[in-house]
């Protein structure tokens, strides 16, 4: 599953044009320069990359950190595999 | 009333990604027309188009902005960057951004249909809506340059650019704003777009031959043209390069037919532009024609020019640069205004290429095939849109 974490971080860095090394698990999205609008594009890219479907309730508004994003995607990939 | 200076130029076209390639290409009579690169070209009757070639948007636009930009907005952003090179500080609410488009985000719409209806995918690009909206270019340009004054898109098919630039011109003239980023952008060379034009039977199977007796229709183009307009006193005070004075604007509606052009509607728009610029017909040396190369437009436009200019029409040079850069629809007027400015500033009038045979119905000097040296003091640029919407810009040398 670390593969999923790496790939999600790759997508975050690519789509949001942010430094990959700043994407520590406890880093807040807004602190590394990732906005909620950026996350819309990120979720689209993640859906394409993993062949999963992310519904609105899967990405709750209290997701604040990079680690929370990767955990949520890990869970969805496991569920939908 | 204030005078309006043109102090910045930007262009992306089938002849290249900047103003220099556009102006040198149109002077040299080069053609941007080639077989379309669309994947399903073999299902099209007419396959020749004037596409912007080897477009690498990432070379001009940052990743986040690119995610929100349809191809027509990408062209507009790149052209705006060029026009802004010498702009000084234009941020704030005394600047407007007015950019026209005929169709809007055609590529985004078609990609969405393709995903859902052909490929059976569940979701479309999450930014489909902001990408396809016609006000993408003015919003994205305003955001980039911190422009907080009036910003909107104008849509009037092939007259969109001239209506945009003419609107900005009037606002500066009346003192409502000091500076405007104005022009047009278009990218509707999509499979369905070409199918639609094909069905209308106005597309040439090979090349566009404006005013030539054997003309068979238009060639669809794409791209963007952006000009920086500025209160003349402001431009002079800051020592800006002034390419030309935007001196007049005329607009009329035929209220006659959605497709067929009207001689009278076009002639009225030309007369209005001349009056607005305080130009006598004999002052004008060059007309950049709408000149689509369709059977209907070219004789009607020729008669309109004769009606508006009277005997002065015999001394005019009239050319259609569309044969070289294609019909840019909503971008056409801005691209052609840049060609007209080029003619005034260089003393070289661009030709009408592919001209093979004179047509008795088209009896003006169309500068066939070779550019011509002529010092031009004033010129007009015509746009006559489907829907009967006519818009004419007049410029003077400075």
Image (spheres, grey):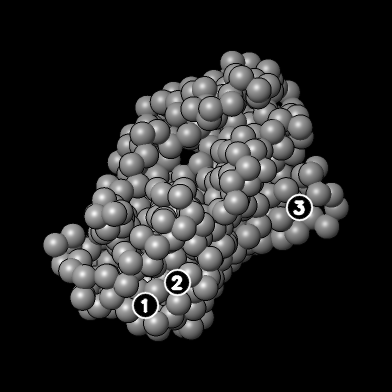
Secondary structure of the residue carrying tag 1 is loop
Is B134 left or right of B141, judged from the image as shown?
A: right
Task: Give above or below for B349 relative to B307.
Answer: above
In the picture, residue B66 is in which quadrant?
bottom left
Report x, y in % for residue A78: 41, 56
Can residue B222 be seen here? The reply is yes
x 31%, y 64%: residue: A70
Is A62 left or right of B109, judged from the image as shown?
A: left
* Residue annotated with mark 3: B387
Report x, y in % for residue B345: 34, 47
Secondary structure of the residue carrying tag 3 is loop
* Residue annotated with mark 1: A63
Question: Is the residue at mark 2 from the same chain as the one at mark 1?
Answer: yes
**Marks 3, 1: nearer the viewer:** 1
Report x, y in % for residue B339: 43, 43
Secondary structure of the residue carrying tag 2 is loop
Is B208 left or right of B336, judged from the image as shown?
A: right
Contact check, label 2 and label 1, Cβ < 8 Å:
yes
Contact check, label 2 and label 3, Cβ < 8 Å:
no
Task: Give above or below for A76 relative to B48.
Answer: below
Mark 1 crowdedness (10 Å alpha carbons): few <14, some 14-19, many ≥20 = few
x 75%, y 59%: residue: B253
Q: Residue furthest top?
A: B356
* Residue annotated with mark 2: A59
In the picture, residue B62 is in which quadrant?
bottom left
B190 or B227: nearer the eye? B190
Contact check, label 3 and label 1, Cβ < 8 Å:
no
x 63%, y 42%: residue: B120
Can residue B81 be seen here? The reply is no
User: Real-space Cα distance between discs 2 and 1?
Assistant: 7 Å
């Amino acid at each position: 599953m670390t593969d999923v974490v790496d790939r999600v971080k790759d997508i975050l860095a690519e789509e949001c044009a942010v430094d990959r090394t700043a994407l520590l698990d406890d880093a807040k999205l807004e602190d590394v320069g990732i906005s909620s609008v950026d996350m819309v594009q990120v979720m689209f890219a993640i859906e394409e990359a993993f062949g999963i479907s992310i519904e609105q309730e899967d990405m709750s508004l209290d997701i604040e950190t990079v680690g929370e994003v990767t955990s949520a995607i890990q869970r969805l990939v496991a569920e939908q595999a | 009333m204030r005078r309006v200076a043109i102090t910045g130029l930007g262009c992306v076209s089938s002849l290249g990604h900047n103003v220099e390639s556009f102006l040198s290409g149109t002077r040299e009579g080069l053609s941007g027309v080639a077989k379309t690169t669309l994947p399903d070209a073999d299902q099209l009757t007419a396959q020749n188009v004037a596409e912007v070639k080897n477009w690498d948007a990432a070379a001009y636009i940052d990743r986040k902005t690119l995610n929100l930009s349809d191809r027509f907005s990408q062209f507009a952003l790149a052209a705006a960057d060029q026009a802004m090179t010498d702009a000084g500080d234009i941020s704030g609410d005394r600047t407007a951004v007015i950019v026209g488009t005929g169709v809007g985000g055609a590529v985004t719409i078609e990609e969405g249909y393709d995903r859902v209806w052909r490929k059976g995918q569940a979701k479309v690009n999450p930014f489909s809506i902001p990408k396809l909206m016609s006000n993408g270019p003015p919003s994205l340009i305003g955001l980039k340059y911190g422009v907080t004054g009036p910003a909107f898109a104008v849509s009037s098919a092939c007259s969109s650019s001239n209506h945009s630039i003419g609107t900005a011109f009037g606002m500066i003239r009346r003192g409502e704003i000091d500076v405007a980023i104005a022009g047009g952008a278009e990218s509707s060379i999509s499979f369905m777009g070409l199918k639609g034009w094909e069905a209308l039977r106005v597309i040439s199977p090979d090349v566009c031959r404006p005013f030539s007796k054997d003309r068979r229709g238009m060639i669809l183009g794409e791209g963007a043209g952006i000009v920086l307009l500025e209160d003349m006193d402001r431009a002079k005070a800051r020592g800006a390069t002034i390419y030309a004075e935007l001196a007049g604007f005329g607009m009329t509606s035929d209220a006659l037919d959605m497709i067929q052009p009207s001689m009278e509607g076009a002639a009225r728009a030309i007369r209005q532009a001349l009056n607005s610029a305080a130009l006598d017909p004999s002052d004008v040396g060059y007309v950049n024609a709408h000149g689509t190369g369709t059977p209907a437009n070219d004789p009607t436009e020729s008669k309109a020019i004769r009606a508006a200019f009277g005997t002065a029409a015999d001394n005019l040079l009239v050319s259609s640069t569309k044969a070289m850069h294609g019909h840019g629809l909503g971008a056409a007027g801005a691209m052609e205004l840049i060609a007209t400015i080029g003619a005034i500033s260089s003393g070289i009038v661009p030709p009408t290429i592919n001209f093979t045979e004179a047509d008795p119905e088209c009896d003006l000097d169309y500068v066939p095939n070779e550019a011509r040296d002529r010092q031009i003091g004033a010129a007009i640029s015509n746009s006559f849109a489907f829907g009967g919407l006519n818009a004419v810009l007049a410029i003077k040398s400075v």
